[in-house]
Each structure stands twice: as C-alpha cells, then as structure tokens.
Image: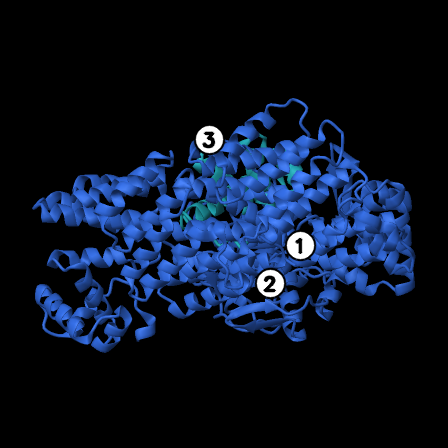
Chain colours: A blue, B cyan
C-alpha cells in the first residue's frame, strides 16, 4: 500500500495525515496526461472523501514532473458565490476593468502564462460547485484554450454552474468519481497515521464508524486519542473503550443535518435509536414520506428485501450520524421514541433476528416492562450474539416463569464462557423435566455433546445420557434425533469406532423424512468419520457441501465451518481454495464482529501457515484467534490453538515465546493429556525439543505417539515429523507406507514416497516427493525433500540433477518465512559425512554452546562431546568453533545462549 | 477454480462502489446503467472501472498466500 506525505506520527488537526490509498488515482491521471488526454480532471465525491487532498497531490505530482512552470489554487466558497471572479481575486490583473468579459479572461490567461515559465499552468479549483458564474466561466476558458490543465473538485450530488459541467460534458476533462477507502486502504491509512500496527478491534471500529471516509476517520482518531480511548500498548494500538464523538465531529455532522423539518428530524432520531429498522416498523410510527426525503439527501439508506423497499430495512446514511444524534437527543424525548419503537416492532411480530433483544433494550431504556417470553427470546438472541453475560441476566429476569427454557438458556451461557461444570450442574437438574421433544433435543445437544463430551471430556457420561434419553418420548422420530447427536459424539471421539459411525450415518442419511437439523448433524458426523477412517476423498466431498454462510447460525455451523478446511489440511487437498474460503469467511466475520467465526477462521489459517512453512504468519493468525476463542469456543479449539502457537514459535526460533505458550496450554488443560489432541501435543512437544537442539528426543516422542495413533492421517503426520527430526528413514518408511496404504490422502502419500526415497537414497524419487509436496503447497517440507534429493544425487555423482534439485529447493525456500529446519541443517552438513550425533553436537556448538552445556543438554559426558566435536570439525575441515557459525541453519537452542 | 475464488474475494476487498461497478460491468451492464445504479455521471463510469481494475491488479500482485486480512 502506497504512502506519501509526512512521516508517520501522532495525528492531529494541525498535522496533515499521510496520503495513503490513492496511488491508483494518481497513476491513472498521470497516465491520461502522458497520453495527451483531456484539458483537466474533475474529481467528484462525497464530503470528506479526500477530494481536496487528492487534487493537491495531483498538482504537486504535475509540478514535480516538470509539467508546468507554476501551479495556482483557487477556492469556491458559499460566501463569495455572488461576487464575480471572487475566486480569482489574486489572479486578476489590477489594470483589468469590468468591461468586456472575454478581454478580462484573456488578461487573466496572460497573467497566469507569465507566472508559468514553460508549459501549461496547473490550476487547482476546489469546491467548484460553489464558484460564481464568472469564475466558473474563466475556469472553462482557461481549460478549453489550453492555458491551464485544471484539477477541479466538486461535491457529489450538488448542482454545479454550467461552465463547470461543460468541463467534462463538452471540453473533454476527465471525470474521476472518488470513492470512500476500502477496509484495506483504511487500515493502511490508520497504521501510517498512527505510526504502528493497530489491533483488529481498532480497525473494525474505525472502518465501521467512518465507512472509509477520510475526514470522519481523522476526526474519530483525533477524538479517540484526546480522550485516551486509543492507546498504544505492547507495540500495537488498542481501543480501551468505545469513544464518544469529539466536538469537531459533532460540528461536522450537525452541519450535514442542518435544515431538516421536525418530521424528518423525528425519523432521523428513530433511526438513530433503532437502526437498522424494518421499514414497516418505521412506517407504523412515522410514515415513509420523511424517510424518502432523507434518502434523497443521502441522510438515510433503504435496503430493499425481496425486491421491495417496503419490506426492507432503513438506516442512517452514515454510522456516525446515529452516534451524534443519540448524543444530541434529550433523554425524555429518547424514552418516548424508544417506547414507540418497541410497540411498533412488537406489533410487526418481531420476525427479524435480534428483534427481541432490541425490544427489551428499548423497553429498559424507556422504563417499560418486558414479560418472561420476551426476556427468554432476547436471552437466546444474546447467546447467539456471543454475549453470554447479557443472556444470563435476561434469562434470570424471567424468574420462575422461565422454567426449564430459562435454565437451558443460562446453561448455554455458562458453556459459552467455558464454565462447563456449572452448566452440567444446572442441566443435570433438568433431566426429567423436559415437556417436549424439541426442548429435549436441544437439551441433549447442549448437555451430552457440548458440555459432557466436548467441554468436560466425560464422553462415557454423554453416551450414558443419550442411552437413557432414547426412552424419553414415544414419537417415532425421536430415536433418530438422539442417534444423530450420539453419532456426532462418537464422530468427534478421536477416531474410536469411525467405521461404525459411517455405517450408522449412511443409514440415517438415507431417510426421506429426516429433520433438516438432524440431517446436518448426521452429515457432519459422517464427514468427520470418513476422514478418521482414511476415506479423505469422500470426506472432502461431504464436508465441502456442508460449508455454511457467514454469519454462522448456530454451533452446527461452527463444525461445518472448519470441517472442510481441516479435511483439506490433513489430507493435502485444495489448500489454496480452503485458505481463500477461510479468509473470505474471516472478512465477513470481521465486518459482523463475530468472535466465534473469527476465532475459528484465524486458528485454522494459522494451522495452514505452519504447514506451509510460514511461522510468522502462523503466529499472527494464532495470536488473533486466541482472544476470540477465549470469548466463545464451543468446539474447544483453544487448546489446539495454543499447541499450534508452540509449534509456530518453535519453528521461528523464539524459545521464550514457545515456552510461554506451552505454559498457557498446560494451565488451560490443567496438566492433563487430552486424548483427541494427542497428535498435536506430541508435535508441539517435539517442535520445542527440536528448537532446543534435542532432535533425538523429539523423534522418540513422535514415534511413540505415532505407535498409539489410530487415525491414519494423524499417524502419517507424526511419522513424518519424526522423519524430519532425524529418525532413521529405514524404520519410518515402512510405517509411513502402511499409513499411506490405509488412507487416500495425497499428503500422506507424498510423505511415504519421501521416506522410502530417503531410505533408498534415491535422488529422483526424492525430487518427485518434493514436487508433490510443492504441488500441495507444503513449501518448507518440499524444500527439505528437494535438498535431500540434491544430497542423494551428489553422493551418486550426478551433478546436473543435484543442481536442479538445489534450484528447486531454493524456489520452495523462497516461499517460506523460515529456513530453521533440522532437515535443511542436516543436509547442509551431510556432504561432510557427519553422523547424526556429530551433526547434533556441531549444530549446538554453532550456536555458541560450550561443551559442558552440550553435555548437560544431551545427557552425555563432556569427554564424549569433545570427542564427537573433534571428529565433526575434522570432517568439516575447520579448526575453530567460530568457523561453525555459518552452519547455523537449524534453530538456535535458546536456553543455551 | 482457485483463481475464481480468489478473484471474487479480492473484488469484495475493493471499495464498495468499485466492486459493484466492476461486477455490473462484467455482467454486461451498459455504462449508463452502471451510472444510474451508482448515482454517478455516465462520464465517470469508464475511469471508475479502470481504477477498479488497477486496484484489483494491485491486490492480485500481493503475496499469494497471505493478505492483510484481519480476522
């Protein structure tokens, strides 16, 4: 993203902000000029979008390019609009009289030409829609006669003097419709202005509030800095609290709202208190005539639904209008308006999501009373909006009248805050008090699946509850509903019984009259079980069909969100597509402030980045995921996210951060071993060991974990990581071939080919495995395989294939964010014929470790270390430890330095 | 498939009016219709589309696997 103007610093009203996000506009105008097109450019856009700044930059760019001897700047103003040639007061020669206008124009043109030593004058005309008629005609004359290249700004929607219109209609000036900045461009401007990275929450607030309007953005940030809401901490800008609009912003917006009738102001106030509002509800209170007028003035926006504006929803033309109007509305008037809003939306049947929550909020704000059914409906909506605290308060207000439904809502709120024991205590007391099958089905999904199985890892108790539940109702459809939940419990139970789940799911999914909810759950269980059984191609197809839209509707959607990417990730299918889809879901979630989606998406993207060899990106993604997952994490993705953070930090060589992540993980799981996380736990433990220089220990951990792993893709991954940690390929290759044979995942197949080729020292086969891994997108692993191919070819005396393999490795390495890899380190040392132990010791010594430290680390005697190191240095042909430094390809053993 | 998914995602990252204008154009809408739809002058449509394409090209030239997406 391009940046021009002053260096980054603290923004303020007195300081010009950096010029960011308009590089294409500048380049486009320059290209048009080079091509000889036009007599000028008319920049049109809404107030605050940055027209004037762009015009000034265009003039500066033109002057800087030697495009004219002088540039002039004139300004249209409302105050001077009735005074002939007022805008050109500084240009009109003193000898000019008020006679012949054409003569006067020629005098002005001559005066401008005199100022320009060569070429055309560059003339900036700001707010040309406010020019007096004579000034407007002079601008047209100067442009059309070739005296000046004009850069003119006009406000969109404002009537312009005829000569200004003639600029682009008749005289050939270019017309540039300047738009608000995009979210990315806003982020770039914000970071350039603040001089540092901003947290996602700051960007979301700034973009949502400003909608990319540069003027509003500047005033928002200035106000937030002044109030202390926006502060820098740990190198990133954070929002401590949501700031109120500052006085300058209030003035700006008040000016936009000036001149409205009382009826229009009332509609503005209703929208400010209730937006977005159903047009039908607004019509019941205030009619739609005022809304239409506001829409014509750009002060309100109506989004039609189903092709009808009457069925659509209305909001104010800019989010900041609402903030300012709410500040300016007297409390008694606001209370009355809120009461009317509550009545109108209730009269409409509260059919839109979030209506109940809004109505309760309005009634509370107006001193009204909400009944138990309304409170419960609002509490459910609060849970859905990831606000469990509010949900609990609302459900509690329903009191005894809320009954089992209120308890269920409160239990959900506990689960959302990961208070699973409290949720179970509450839910256990409800067993036997559930009057309807629908209520009982919701209860079972909550208690058996989310609380007992996923939350408390009491899978046996969950299955026991489901067994008891089969007899709760005589409805013929009831057993199927229980079975679908049971399937999902079994399907997420670390691969146990996947074959049985597949068989049962295939039976359930053949039913014609299956409840859509049950069908979705059974399909999800089916997809996970197929994956666990090694039928990854089938799992890919089933999970891809289940992808949900954003915003997510419920927890089933959360499963569906990650099912397809995780199948792709483990199997090696469609990495590019899966990442693109996750990013898109992440964008949508960021726009909707959905911590649930954001956390899942960021965590999954972090997992991809690790496998691609991008630990910096992975650390950023995982770091973004953790706060979101701490707010809401129904699938218990938080532990695995910490594990991946250990891996990414270790890959990056930051041992301190890796150990901190390990401590956080241990605290989270209270030191327990979580069965379904066993592969990732082993990987994280091994990654840390590798970073500490203990590759032998790492390989042992991974091989032990692989021996106990039933899921073929997970077993394949563990074996492959063991291979990367220098395990003997002759031992690993047969096991990896067996894993590859028991699943159809391309990634595991590539792993097996690499292991076999390594065992056979087959350079061509290693290069083939490298190409396969590169095709999947596993850049670091592909680079490693290609480097191993180069070594194998070199040993066999094949120079050309070795060079090609090295070049291939280089291309893959270019895609990576780290080259800290035990495999690349070993390959670097391989030509000297070092043994594994010699490599290990040379690697530690290359980072400056003393013999005593190495001995302590590897549990060897100092004499043994000395002996290995002496032989290693002899083979390498070097005489001092200092000469080992260039061999630092592997990660540094942080604890030793 | 990958290209289509990525391109669609990148178009969504353009300023909203540019994204709408580009989609309308690619769907075969005439400039007059695009101008009416976006509430701009017809003469501004062609430059706007050129800018949209330039901004899209910049996004496409970004790092292949990553962006400045904030999730």
Query: Numbered disc 3: what chain?
Result: A
Left or right: residue A83 compared with residue A580: right
User: Is disc 2 surrounded by few (<14), some (14 to 19) or many (20+) residues within 10 Å?
Assistant: many
Left or right: residue B25 compared with residue A298: left
Question: What residue is shown with label 1?
Answer: A415
Q: Residue at x 76, y 55 (%)?
A: A391
Check the picture and name the quadrant holding the N terminus of chain B: top left
Q: Residue at x 43, y 32 (%)?
A: A537
Q: Nearer the viewer, residue A615 or A506?
A: A506
Q: Nearer the viewer, residue A746 or A197?
A: A746
- Which label lies toward us, 1 or 3? 1
**What percent of the width, then of the height, locates residue B29?**
59, 30
Left or right: residue A507 compared with residue A243: left
Left or right: residue A874 compared with residue A310: left
**What percent of the width, then of the height, locates residue A83?**
72, 61
Q: Is A142 placed above or below A580 here?
A: below
CA–CA distance in space, label 1 to label 3:
33 Å
Question: What residue is shown with label 2?
Answer: A202
Q: Nearer the viewer, residue A591 or A136?
A: A591
Residue A260 seen in the current view: no
Question: What residue is shown with label 3?
Answer: A538
Query: CB of mark 1 within 8 Å of CB of mark 3?
Result: no
User: Is disc 3 surrounded by few (<14), some (14 to 19) or many (20+) residues within 10 Å?
Assistant: some
- Which element is circle 1 on? helix
**What percent of the width, then of the height, locates residue A308?**
77, 33
């Amino acid at each position: 993203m391009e940046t021009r103007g002053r260096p980054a610093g603290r923004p303020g009203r007195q300081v010009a902000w950096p010029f960011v996000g308009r590089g294409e506009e500048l380049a486009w105008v320059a290209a048009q000029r080079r091509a000889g097109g036009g007599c000028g450019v008319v920049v049109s856009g809404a107030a605050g979008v940055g027209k004037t700044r762009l015009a000034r930059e265009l003039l500066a760019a033109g002057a800087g390019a030697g495009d004219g001897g002088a540039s002039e700047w004139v300004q249209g103003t409302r105050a001077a609009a009735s005074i002939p040639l007022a805008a050109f007061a500084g240009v009109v020669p003193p000898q000019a009289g008020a006679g012949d206008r054409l003569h006067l124009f020629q005098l002005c043109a001559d005066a401008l030409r005199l100022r320009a030593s060569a070429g055309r004058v560059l003339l900036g005309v700001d707010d040309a829609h406010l020019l007096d008629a004579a000034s407007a005609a002079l601008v047209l004359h100067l442009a059309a006669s070739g005296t000046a290249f004009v850069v003119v700004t006009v406000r969109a929607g404002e009537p312009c003097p005829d000569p200004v219109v003639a600029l682009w209609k008749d005289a050939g000036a270019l017309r540039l419709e300047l738009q608000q900045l995009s979210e990315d461009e806003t982020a770039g401007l914000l970071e350039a202005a603040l001089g540092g990275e901003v947290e996602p929450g700051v960007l979301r607030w700034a973009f949502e509030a400003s909608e990319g309007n540069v003027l509003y953005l500047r005033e928002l940030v200035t106000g937030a800095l002044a109030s202390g809401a926006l502060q820098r901490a740990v190198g990133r800008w954070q929002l401590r609290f949501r700031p109120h609009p500052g006085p300058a912003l209030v003035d700006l917006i008040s000016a936009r709202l000036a001149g409205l009738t009382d009826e229009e102001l009332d509609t503005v106030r209703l929208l400010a208190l209730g937006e977005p509002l159903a047009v039908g509800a607004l019509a019941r209170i205030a009619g739609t005539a005022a809304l239409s007028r506001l829409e014509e003035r750009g002060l309100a926006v109506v989004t039609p639904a189903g092709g009808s504006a009457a069925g659509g929803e209305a909001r104010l033309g800019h989010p900041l209008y609402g903030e300012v109007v709410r500040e300016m509305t007297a409390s008694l008037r606001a209370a009355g308006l809120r009461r009317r809003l509550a009545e109108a939306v209730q009269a409409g049947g509260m059919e839109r999501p979030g209506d109940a929550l809004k109505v309760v909020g309005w009634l509370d704000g107006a001193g009204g009373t909400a009944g138990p059914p309304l409170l419960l409906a609002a509490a459910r909506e609060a849970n859905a909006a990831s606000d469990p605290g509010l949900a609990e308060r609302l459900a509690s207000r329903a009191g005894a009248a809320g009954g089992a439904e209120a308890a269920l809502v409160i239990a959900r709120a506990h689960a959302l805050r990961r208070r699973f024991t409290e949720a179970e205590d509450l839910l256990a007391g409800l067993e036997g008090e559930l009057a309807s099958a629908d209520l009982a089905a919701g209860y079972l999904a909550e208690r058996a699946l989310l609380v007992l199985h996923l939350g408390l890892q009491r899978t046996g108790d969950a299955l026991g509850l489901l067994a008891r539940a089969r007899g709760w109702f005589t409805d013929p459809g009831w057993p199927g509903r229980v079975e679908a939940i049971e399937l999902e419990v079994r399907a997420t139970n670390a691969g146990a019984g996947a074959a049985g789940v597949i068989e049962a799911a295939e039976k359930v999914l053949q039913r014609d009259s299956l409840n859509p909810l049950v069908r979705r759950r059974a399909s999800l269980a089916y997809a996970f079980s197929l994956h666990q059984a090694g039928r990854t191609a089938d799992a890919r197809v089933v999970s891809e069909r289940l992808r949900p839209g954003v915003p997510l509707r419920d927890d089933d959607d959360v499963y569906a969100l990650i099912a397809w990417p995780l199948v792709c990730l483990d199997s090696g299918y469609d990495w590019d597509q899966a990442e693109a889809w996750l990013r898109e879901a992440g964008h949508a979630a960021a726009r909707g402030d959905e911590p649930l989606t954001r956390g899942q998406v960021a965590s999954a993207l972090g997992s991809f980045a690790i496998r691609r060899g991008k630990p910096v990106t992975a650390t950023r993604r995982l770091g973004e995921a953790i706060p979101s997952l701490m707010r809401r994490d129904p699938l218990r993705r938080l532990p695995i996210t910490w594990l991946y953070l250990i891996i990414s930090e270790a890959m990056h060589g930051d041992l301190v951060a890796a150990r901190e992540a390990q401590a956080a993980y241990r605290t989270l799981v209270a030191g327990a071993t979580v069965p379904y996380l066993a592969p990732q736990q082993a990987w994280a433990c091994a990654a840390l060991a590798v970073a500490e220089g203990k590759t032998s220990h790492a390989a042992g951990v991974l091989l032990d974990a692989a021996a106990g792993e039933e899921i073929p893709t997970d077993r394949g991954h563990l074996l492959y990581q063991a291979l990367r940690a220098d395990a003997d390929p002759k031992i690993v290759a047969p096991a990896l071939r067996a894993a590859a044979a028991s699943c159809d995942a391309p990634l595991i197949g590539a792993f097996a080919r690499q292991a076999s080729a390594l065992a056979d020292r087959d350079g061509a086969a290693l290069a083939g495995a490298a190409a396969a891994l590169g095709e999947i997108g596993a850049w670091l692993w592909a680079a490693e395989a290609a480097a191993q191919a180069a070594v194998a070819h070199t040993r066999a005396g094949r120079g050309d294939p070795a060079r090609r393999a090295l070049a291939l490795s280089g291309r893959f390495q270019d895609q990576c964010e780290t080259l800290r890899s035990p495999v690349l380190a070993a390959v670097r040392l391989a030509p000297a014929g070092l043994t594994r132990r010699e490599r290990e010791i040379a690697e530690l010594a290359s980072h400056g470790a003393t013999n005593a430290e190495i001995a302590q680390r590897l549990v060897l005697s100092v004499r043994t270390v000395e002996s290995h190191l002496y032989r290693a240095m002899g083979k390498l042909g070097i005489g001092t430890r200092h000469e080992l430094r260039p061999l630092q390809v592997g990660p540094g053993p942080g604890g030793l330095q | 498939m990958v290209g289509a998914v990525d391109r669609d995602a990148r178009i969504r990252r353009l300023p909203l009016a540019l994204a709408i204008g580009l989609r309308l154009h690619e769907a075969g809408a005439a400039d007059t219709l695009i101008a009416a739809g976006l509430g701009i002058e017809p003469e501004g449509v062609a430059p706007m589309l050129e800018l949209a394409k330039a901004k899209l090209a910049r996004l496409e030239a970004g790092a292949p696997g990553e962006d400045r997406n904030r999730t």
